Image (cartoon, helix red, strand yellow):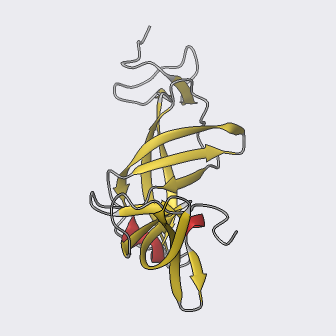
């Protein structure tokens, strides 16, 4: 009998019962799926917004009502010539082992906002010709437009680098109504 040094799922078997093996020869590959690595391709244009340690949300069409939270653990320094992407490794807890090896998933990386950055929903920003504006509450029930400069954007959020102050209340939907 040979005991594995760790628990998990056998993903490869290199020997059969009764077969002689040499010392150090691999017999089985055992994988623990309770924590997984997700490899995401990040477009070159988006690399400036991605940092190690950044939170990531993982979804799969297989499990439409679920999502997993992970963190970017590694960002490849090389860019693939054919796709113009770099790989980001996201590590996520997978306690019920629903995520499987080779599965296609979608990874949404959070806005790389600093502690002092203001983040608003993308729906709050309106483009009026060459400028972006948000509608800010000026008095109870009264709103006015304010020109803003935008920073990094991802998912449904965008960083506002200029034009808003902490505590400003902005319209997030139906601003022209």
Which of the pair 76/152 is nearer the observer?
152
Q: Position of residue 64 (x, y in %)?
A: 71, 40
Q: Position of residue 116 (x, y in %)?
A: 27, 61
Q: Is residue 10 above or below residue 57?
A: above
Which of the pair 51/136 is nearer the observer?
136
Question: Is residue 29 among the parts visible in the rendering?
Answer: no
Q: In this image, 2 relative to 141: left or right? A: left
Q: Position of residue 88 (x, y in %)?
A: 43, 58
Residue that extends furthest to the bottom in the rendered view of this protein: 130
Q: In this image, 32 relative to 128: left or right? A: left
Query: Residue at image x 36%, y 60%?
Result: 75
Displayed quadrant of residue 16 = top right
Question: Is residue 70 among the parts visible in the rendering?
Answer: yes
Instruction: State which quarter of the image contains the C terminus.
Output: bottom right
Query: Residue at image x 42%, y 70%?
Result: 152
Q: Position of residue 117 (x, y in %)?
A: 32, 63
Q: Is residue 105 above or below residue 78?
A: above
Instruction: State which quarter of the image contains the N terminus.
Output: top left
């Amino acid at each position: 009998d040979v005991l594995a040094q760790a628990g998990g799922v056998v993903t490869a078997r290199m020997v059969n019962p009764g077969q002689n093996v040499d010392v150090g020869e691999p017999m089985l590959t055992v994988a623990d799926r309770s924590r997984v690595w997700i490899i995401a391709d990040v477009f070159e244009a988006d690399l400036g917004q991605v940092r190690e340690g950044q939170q990531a949300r993982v979804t799969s069409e297989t499990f439409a009502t679920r999502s997993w939270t992970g963190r970017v653990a590694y960002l490849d320094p090389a860019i693939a010539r054919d796709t113009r992407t770099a790989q980001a490794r996201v590590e996520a807890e997978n306690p019920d082992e629903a995520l499987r090896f080779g599965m296609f998933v979608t990874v949404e990386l959070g806005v790389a906002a600093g502690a002092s950055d203001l983040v608003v929903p993308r729906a709050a920003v309106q483009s009026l010709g060459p400028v972006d504006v948000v509608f800010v509450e000026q008095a109870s029930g009264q709103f006015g437009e304010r020109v803003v400069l935008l920073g990094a954007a991802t998912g449904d959020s965008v960083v506002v680098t200029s034009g808003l102050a902490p505590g400003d209340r902005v319209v997030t939907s139906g601003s022209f109504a």
